[in-house]
Image (spheres, rainbow, N blue to C red):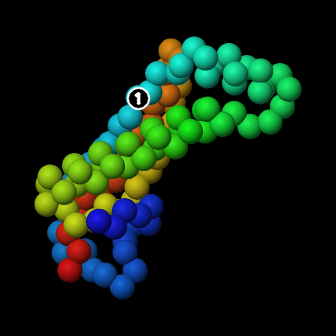
């Protein structure tokens, strides 16, 4: 399945719009990761634990987006937008876009 942030797929026509689809992922922050992240913040550098969590959440949200597009008969998702939020020590990633059928 083609998933793109652009409003169309170059070289392909959109035959049908199936509607907005959304995938979400909410991951809790691990206490030990929080401690090590604070140490990294103090001494400088990147927080590998948080980067790994962010990548995992993004992949989950995009996978759900694809699954929901397929459920409504879509063959691609266009106009994808990724949103990130932190809510009460939890990381939320939301991916939304329009499921379409390509010719």
Image quarter of the N terminus = bottom left
- The residue at which mark 1 appears reads as 26
Toward the viewer: 45 or 1?
45
Q: Image quadrant of residue 64?
A: top left
Q: Position of residue 23 (x, y in %)?
A: 32, 42
At 35% from the left and 37% from the top, the residue drawn is 24
Q: Position of residue 41 (x, y in %)?
A: 78, 26
Q: Is residue 20 visible?
A: no
Left or right: where does residue 84 sit relative to residue 60? right
Q: Position of residue 8 (x, y in %)?
A: 37, 71
Toward the viewer: 49 or 79?
49
Please determine whether, in this image, residue 37 is positioned above or below residue 79. above
At 83% from the left and 22% from the top, the residue drawn is 42
Seen as rendered, the residue at the extreme right is 43
Toward the viewer: 5 or 30?
30
Image quarter of the C terminus = bottom left
Q: Image quadrant of residue 100?
A: bottom left
At 22% from the left and 66% from the top, the residue drawn is 75
Please determine whether, in this image, residue 3 is positioned above or below residue 68. below
Q: How many marks?
A: 1
Crowding at mark 1 (Cα within 10 Å: few <14, some 14-19, many 20+): some
Please determine whether, in this image, residue 92 is positioned above or below residue 67. above
At 41% from the left and 64% from the top, the residue drawn is 4
Q: Is residue 93 visible?
A: yes
Please determine whether, in this image, residue 47 is positioned above or below residue 20. above
Q: Position of residue 71 (x, y in %)?
A: 14, 52
Secondary structure beneath label 1? strand
């Amino acid at each position: 399945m083609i998933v793109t942030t652009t409003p169309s797929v170059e070289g392909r026509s959109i035959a049908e719009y199936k509607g907005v689809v959304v995938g979400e992922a909410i991951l809790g922050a691990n206490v030990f990761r929080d401690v090590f992240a604070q140490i990294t913040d103090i001494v400088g550098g990147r927080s590998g634990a948080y980067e790994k969590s962010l990548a995992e959440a993004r992949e989950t949200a995009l996978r759900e987006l694809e699954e929901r597009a397929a459920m409504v008969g879509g063959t691609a998702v266009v106009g994808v937008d990724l949103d990130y939020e932190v809510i009460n020590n939890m990381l939320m990633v939301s991916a939304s876009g329009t499921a379409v059928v390509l010719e």
